[in-house]
Image (tube, rainbow, N blue to C red):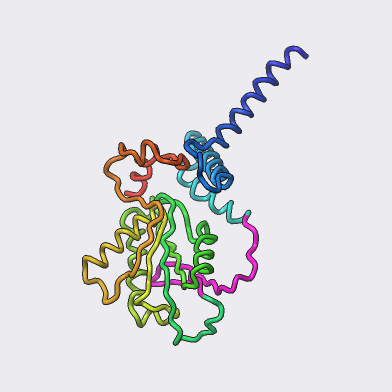
C-alpha cells in the first residue's frame, strides 16, 4: 500500500497540472465571457497537442488534424430551431458559398436588402462556412441583412493567392447590380467582413476596389475582426505580448509556410 501512494500522488499531481494548464489563460483579468474563452483556449491546446503527436508519429500532418477537428465540433452542435432565416448553399462564379436571407422575402425580387459578404478565419488553412455558421447566422438575425459566407480554397492544397481570388470573384460578382438582384441584394449597400485570415482578405479586397476601377460599385463598409495585416515581422508586441493569450502566435511562421 505504501508503495502505491507515491505513484497515486504523481498521477493526481500530473492530472491537476494538466487541468491547470488547460484552464489557465494569461492576462485574462477583466475580460468578459472568460468561461467561453477558457473552453476555446483549452480546446485549441488539446487539438494542437493531438496534431503535434500525430505529425511526430507520422500519421497525419498537424494542420490536417487541426482543420478536421472543426468537423467533429460541428457534429456536437445542437440542431437549430426555426430562426426566420432561409439558408442555402450555393455557387457563385464556381465558388461555394452559403447565403442567409430573411424568410419573409417570399421570392419578391423587387425588395433589395443590404448585404454582408463574410470571409471566415482559420489561419488560411482551417475554418469553413460550417465552423463559422453560428456567427454568420447570428449576424444575419441581428442585422436583418442578407449574409453571404464564402467557402474559399484553403492552403496548403490551395496556396496563395487562391483563397483571396475566390473571395474576390464572389465580391465582384455581387457588386454588379444585375447579379445582386438575383439574391435580393442592393449592390450599392454591401459590406465586407472577416476574422483573422478572413480579415486579411477583407482589408486587401477593400483596398483593391477603392484603388482600382474594378466595378461601378464598391464595398460601402469593411469590418475587420482581429485581422492578419502583415507577415514580415513576428517580433512586434502584438505577436510577442498579446493582451490575451488564446492563440499560439509562435506558430505564425509555420502558417506562413503553409499559406505560400
Number of marks in the image?
Answer: 0
Q: Residue furthest top?
A: 2
- Residue drawn where x is 37% and y is 72% of the image: 190
| The N terminus: image quadrant | top right
Name which residue lies at 52% across and 72% down: 88
Question: Residue at horizontal 58%, vertical 52%?
Answer: 73
Q: Does the magenta stretch include residue 95?
A: yes
Given residues 32 and 186, the one toward you in this image is 32
Residue 99 painted magenta: yes
Residue 45 x/y as whole percent: 52, 39
Percent of width and height locating residue 62: 47, 42
Where does the image place residue 124, in percent across and percent down from the top left? 39, 52
For the view shown, which residue lies furthest in the left direction?
212
Q: With 123 as the anchor, is 22 left or right in this view?
A: right
Q: Is 67 displayed left or right of 153 in the figure?
A: right
Write the start and end of the magenta stretch as one range: 77-101
Camera-nearest residue between 54 and 257: 257
Residue 109 picture location, percent across and down: 46, 86
Q: Is residue 95 above or below residue 257?
A: below
Q: Is residue 90 left or right of residue 228?
A: right
Whether residue 89 is visible here, answered yes or no, is yes
Seen in the picture, residue 236 relative to 10 is either above or below; the reply is below
Residue, far right: 1
Regarding residue 59, the answer to whether it shows in the image is no
The residue sitting at 35% across, 69% down in the picture is 171
Which secondary structure dominates the residues rendered in magenta?
strand
Amino acid at each position: 500500500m505504501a508503495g502505491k501512494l507515491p505513484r497515486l500522488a504523481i498521477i493526481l499531481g500530473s492530472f491537476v497540472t494538466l487541468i491547470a494548464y488547460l484552464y489557465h489563460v494569461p492576462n485574462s483579468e477583466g475580460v468578459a465571457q472568460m468561461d467561453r474563452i477558457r473552453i476555446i483556449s483549452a480546446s485549441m491546446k488539446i487539438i494542437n497537442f493531438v496534431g503535434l503527436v500525430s505529425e511526430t508519429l507520422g500519421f497525419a500532418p498537424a494542420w490536417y488534424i487541426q482543420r478536421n477537428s472543426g468537423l467533429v465540433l460541428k457534429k456536437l452542435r445542437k440542431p437549430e430551431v426555426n430562426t426566420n432565416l432561409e439558408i442555402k448553399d450555393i455557387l457563385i462564379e464556381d465558388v461555394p458559398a452559403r447565403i442567409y436571407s430573411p424568410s419573409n422575402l417570399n421570392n419578391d425580387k423587387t425588395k433589395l436588402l443590404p448585404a454582408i459578404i463574410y470571409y471566415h478565419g482559420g489561419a488560411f488553412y482551417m475554418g469553413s462556412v460550417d465552423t463559422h455558421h453560428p456567427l454568420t447566422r447570428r449576424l444575419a438575425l441581428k442585422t436583418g441583412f442578407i449574409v453571404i459566407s464564402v467557402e474559399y480554397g484553403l492552403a496548403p492544397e490551395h496556396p496563395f493567392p487562391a483563397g483571396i481570388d475566390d473571395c474576390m470573384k464572389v465580391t465582384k460578382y455581387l457588386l454588379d447590380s444585375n447579379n445582386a438582384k438575383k439574391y435580393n441584394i442592393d449592390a450599392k449597400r454591401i459590406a465586407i467582413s472577416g476574422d483573422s485570415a478572413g480579415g486579411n482578405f477583407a482589408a486587401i479586397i477593400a483596398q483593391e476596389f477603392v484603388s482600382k476601377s474594378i466595378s461601378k460599385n464598391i464595398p460601402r463598409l469593411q469590418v475587420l475582426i482581429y485581422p492578419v495585416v502583415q507577415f514580415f515581422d513576428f517580433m512586434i508586441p502584438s505577436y510577442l505580448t498579446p493582451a490575451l493569450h488564446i492563440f499560439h502566435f509562435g506558430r505564425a511562421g509555420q502558417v506562413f509556410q503553409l499559406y505560400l
